[in-house]
Amino acid sequence: MSVTLIAELCQNHLGDFKLVKEMVDEAVEAGATHIKIQHIYTKNLTFRPQFEEGLTQNGVTQSIKRPWEPEFERLKPLELSSEDNRKFVKYVESKGAVPLTTCFARCDIPAIKAEGFKAIKVASYDCASYQLLRELAEHFSEIFVSTGATFSNEIKKASQVLKDKNVNYTFLHCVTIYPTPLEEMHLSRLDWLKGLSQETGFSDHSLVSRDGVFASKAAIAVGAKVVERHFTVLEEDESKDGPVSIRPEHLRELKRFSELSNEEQFDELNNEMPQWKEILLGNAGRKLSHEELLNRDYYRGRFASPRESGKHQSASMIYNWEETGV
């Protein structure tokens, strides 16, 4: 069956456009249909005091520790310029693939459109940022939305927002634990999403050294039409996302598996892991785990649109869910 394979370059390019091109070449050759980068810019990084030291009560983490300054210093060298983004679009299209990016702040929408992107990705933590969804639907013909760390009622509303805009959209099941254990995958959630989305898929953050691409293969077998994986040509320890990033040989494996009949797919999975259904399918109506709720608390609002240039305080930012203009 035809499966869309998204190679997510994330910050694995280390801010080096030569490495971006190498990754594009490898990903396309291995079978990727879409190549994705991220519009992450430190100008949009919000300073929120509660994450400077974090909070633990009675031995239970209530708020993670993620200080603003080290995060700013880590991200700044990884930024791609607008000219890099334009070159990325043209280069990916010249290879016969579709260029994608993730929009993390509403203020960047005009620039992303001007750079030539026609399709867009929404990160899990913005699935319920309905104003962002509305504005993206005004500018892009195709939207992929990850649904991790989002409550079921929020996903339902996001579906209605996009339907009202009459835009092509795909919901991607996702678990926002990095890396995600196989027993936390809850792939039966795909069936639930089918009632809310024109297409459904899976954004996989499993640990490659331990689990390979098994979860992605299982998702394809049970009906995922899209699979997104972080992708790298570097060694696992050379980038922050390295441990959850697949390499060209893994992408070729996914491509091969996607071309099997469904019966052949199930036979292969059963041979590799006879108990895979009991382990991976989980609960379609699953609740968010404590770890996911902590990640939601931090990442939802991590990026926003500055009201004033150079201001990062939360009061000086317009969040993606606010209905005010940017």
Image (tube, grey):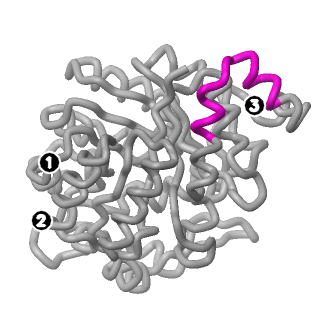
Check disc 3 and report the residue beneath it. Answer: 282
Residue situated in front as seen by the camera: 192 or 116: 116
Q: Is residue 285 visible?
A: yes
Asked if the residue at tag 1 contacts the one at tag 3, i.e. Cβ–Cβ closer than 8 Å, the answer is no
Left or right, 95 with respect to 236, comes to: left
Left or right, 49 with respect to 53, comes to: left
Q: Earlier in the sequence, mark 2 or mark 1?
A: 1
Nearer the observer: mark 2 or 1; the answer is 1
Q: Is residue 292 visible?
A: no
Magenta residues (range): 254-269
Residue situated in front as seen by the camera: 69 or 226: 226
Give the numbered dot on residue 58: none
Q: Earlier in the sequence, mark 3 or mark 1?
A: 1
Asked if the residue at tag 1 contacts the one at tag 2, i.e. Cβ–Cβ closer than 8 Å, the answer is no
Rounded to the nearest whole Å, what is the CA distance between mark 2 and mark 3? 43 Å
Rounded to the nearest whole Å, what is the CA distance between mark 3 and mark 1? 40 Å
Check disc 2 and report the residue beneath it. Answer: 307
Element type where label 2 sits in the image = loop
For residue 64: magenta? no
Q: Position of residue 53 (x, y in %)?
A: 52, 81
* Crowd rating for badge 2 (residues with CA inside 10 Å; few <14, some 14–19, many 20+): some
- Image height check: is 137 above or below 10? above
Q: Position of residue 156 (x, y in %)?
A: 43, 23
Give the numbered dot on residue 116: 1
